[in-house]
Image (spheres, rainbow, N blue to C red):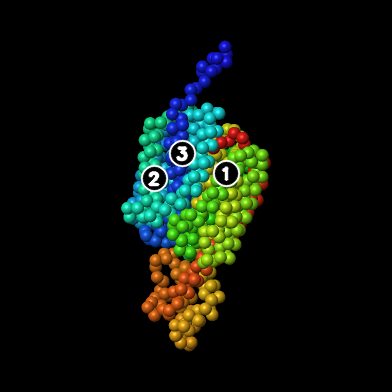
Amino acid sequence: MQAEALLEKAPTPYRWRWVALFVILAVEVMDLLDALVTSIAGPVIRAEIGGSYSLIQWLGAAYTLSMAIGLLTGGRLGDIFGRRRMFVIGAVGFTAASMLCALSWSPGVLIGARAIQGLFGALMLPQGLGMIRQMFSPSEQAKAFGSFGPVMGLGAVGGPILAGWLVDADYFGAGWRMIFFINLPLGLFAIIGAFKFLPEFKSERSLRLDLAGVVLAGVGGFLLLYPLVQGRELDWPVWVFVMLAAGVVVFGLFGIYENRRDKRGLDPLVTPSLFGKRAFTGGLAVGMAFFGALIGTGLIFTLYLQVGLGFSPLKAGLTTLPQAVGMIAGFVAAGSGLTERLGRKLLLLGTIVMMAGTAGVAVTVALTGSDLTPWHLIPGLLPLGIGMGLAMAPFFNIVLAGVDDEETGSASGALTSVQQLGGAFGIALLGTVFFGLLPGSVTSHVDDSAAKLTAVFAEAGVPAGQQPAVAAAVRACLHDRAAEDDPDVRPASCESQGQAAPAGLAEFSQGVVTDAFRDSTVLSLGVAFLMQLLAFALAFLLPREARADAGH
């Protein structure tokens, strides 16, 4: 009799839960595509809309930084005001920001629109994950969350290819703008689907939003990221380093403020007790290093393929296909029971495989040079992707195994934010390293090719007595062009070459630039390798076993 009474009280599963899941997955795909497409389209966007090379960095960094900040409070807003309401607001804002991106007329407008996209995306995405837990029974939640893997894998494979195809196809003369226009039907579907099929949920407990904490986290992130992206172009003035130091101080103040807020019985953005747990602080450090290397490497690779080798966006997107396929294979292998059996060892193994793949790509680039084809890169990119999948799959569950049950929600939000912040940090750091190495690499190759340059002069009939001066002018011009923030600007040192440039010099110069891009890419991949090595070492701070019930 008691059992029958319990069955009668058991909640009836939400009728439209599987359709609602499809709506939630649509916005996940929309977010994933927008995180990936600008890496492929970035060089073309910069060439058309103007601006310096840092625009390519900001296209990714603005989106991921604003999303990292927004994720700290996005889920909390859903608890306070209702998850469907916040989902709809986020979808409307994200779609409108996509339209602004597509219609942008200047680099500043495009960067601002990308930041707005990230903020509304951070408002939209957490609501879907929360609603899944409430719409589905415990037995169905595994299937619902399990559907994310294949969908995200498909997005990872299709995103770069779709971006390259849309840019190259130039539909309706829109060019790169089509990568943002494509969000309009997806966003409209999500908005209509949300009104029709998503239920409304709101926390029964009275919650307050930590606005001061949001501001402190946002200011701290900006103070750290802006100098890393712009410092090289500004020639590293003193105030850039002051900003970096101020960013560290602001994050320290954020920690103090959150602790005081918690002691007063108010709701903090991040539960302060988490910072006393080795698993959580270690997880933050591992996430920064790992995701920084992962996202930053994608930027460097795109720059080399498109700017250094002249690949089209579609060819560049297809070149990265083995990495995406490998990542899906890694996720599938991890989901087949490896996470439960190996725990932390799987994360360590994945990082090792990822390091081997990074080294393989670097060696391939170094040996093939301008003769590189997409086929050459398969032996390096495939294990790189497999390692990513093996390491990423258990990351959250391993870290969450070291926190208490009541801290899981706060820890999950913080880890997801760090995933985004790590991506922004990687874009800033590796992009700065890449462009910082380029001018020196150019001059080094000019010096190493002195005999070849002399042959060019001799064939063009340049008198022997004038050759040293002309060679010095060529060296200065190529160096200054590589150091120029805006590649469309012609440095003063190049003006003297004008129409009187010797025959064969253009081919020589292009070869030098290509070789310089190759060397900068190899050295930047070396920095990414060191970041992965750091993540491997820090991973020993994490629990040995994964948490079985920590679906995120």
Q: What amino acid is at disc 2? A: Asn
Q: What amino acid is at disc 3? A: Leu
Q: Residue at x 42, y 53 (%)?
A: 165
**Element type at marker 2?**
helix
Q: Residue at x 60, y 58 (%)?
A: 360
Q: Which residue position is annotated with label 3?
A: 25
Q: Which residue position is annotated with label 1?
A: 331
Q: Which residue position is annotated with label 2?
A: 183
> Height in image: 434 above or below 257?
below
Of the image marks 2 and 1, the number of the one nearer the N terminus: 2
**Label 3 near label 1: C-beta < 8 Å?**
no
Of the image marks 2 and 3, the number of the one nearer the N terminus: 3
> Height in image: 391 above or below 433?
above
In terms of image quadrants, where is residue 194?
top left
Residue neighbourhood size for the residue with mark 1, other residues' Cα within 10 Å, grouped as few (<14), some (14–19), many (≥20): many
**Element type at marker 1?**
helix
Of the image marks 1 and 3, the number of the one nearer the N terminus: 3
Residue neighbourhood size for the residue with mark 3, other residues' Cα within 10 Å, grouped as few (<14), some (14–19), many (≥20): many
Q: What amino acid is at disc 1? A: Phe
**Element type at marker 3?**
helix
Find residue 226 and report its horizontal and vertical position in percent: 47, 55
